[in-house]
Image (cartoon, grey):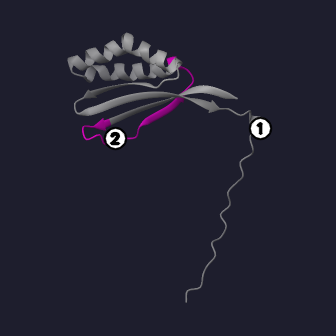
Amino acid sequence: MIRRAFWCEHTASKGDLKIKGRPEREIVSTPGEAIRKIRMNVRRLAPTLPSFGQERALNWTDSGGCLQATGALHRGEPCGFSISSHGTWYEWTVRSFDQFLAPAELLLPLVPVHSAPRPRYASH
């Protein structure tokens, strides 16, 4: 069975574009769930932003931006939001993909991996 899923990623990078920490990644099953995760993160960050950044972030979360992003995901298009704060660039992206789900009875059992002893070579 193939099901549509959504790959969500959040990164933070310094002004030199080096990623700070590990990107946060997860798979969700609906466009609404993906956008809800972005909105929660952006709202959490908003109080730390300068006034212009706060306004931009809250406008995206509470009005047109997140609605357009949800529409894009329903059409199979990627979407995202990014904002800068105190020299750090925050970016959220979402892409749809087809997730292949096989019924459990069709999956092969895992085979334990046994380490074979390495041959020892005589040195000359």
Q: Mark 1: few, some, or many residues within 10 Å (few <14, many ≥20)?
A: few
In what element is the residue under mark 2?
loop
- Nearer to us in this view, 76 or 37: 76
User: Residue 69 — which label?
Assistant: none
Q: What residue type is labelled 2?
A: Ile
Q: How far apart are marks 1 and 2 (CA)?
A: 40 Å
110 vs 82, left or right, is right
Looking at the rendered structure, the secondary structure element under dot 1 is helix
Q: Give the range drawn in magenta.
A: 13-32
**Residue 4 position (above or below residue 124):** above
Depth check: 117 or 77 in front? 77
The number of discs equals 2
Residue 37: image location, x then y, percent: 45, 22
Q: Position of residue 74 (x, y in %)?
A: 53, 18
| Residue shown at 65% from the left, 63% from the top | 115
Say if 12 sits above or below 61 in the image: below
Which residue is the extreme one toward the right? 105
Query: Amino acid under label 1?
Result: Leu
- In this view of the protein, which residue sits in the foreground, 36 or 69? 69
Quadrant of the image for the C terminus?
Answer: bottom right
Give the labeled residue for mark 2: 19
Quarter of the image holding residue 24? top left
Q: Nearer the viewer, residue 71 or 12?
A: 71
Which numbered disc covers residue 106?
A: 1
Q: Is residue 8 magenta?
A: no
Mark positioned earlier in the residue sequence (1 or 2): 2
Q: At 78% from the left edge and 36% from the top edge, which residue is drawn?
A: 105
Coordinates of residue 15 in the picture (x, y in percent) = 24, 37
**Residue drawn at point x = 32 percent, y = 14 percent:** 58
Give the residue drawn at x 42%, y 14%: 68
Q: In this view, does 21 lie above or below 2?
A: below
Quadrant of the frame with the N terminus: top right
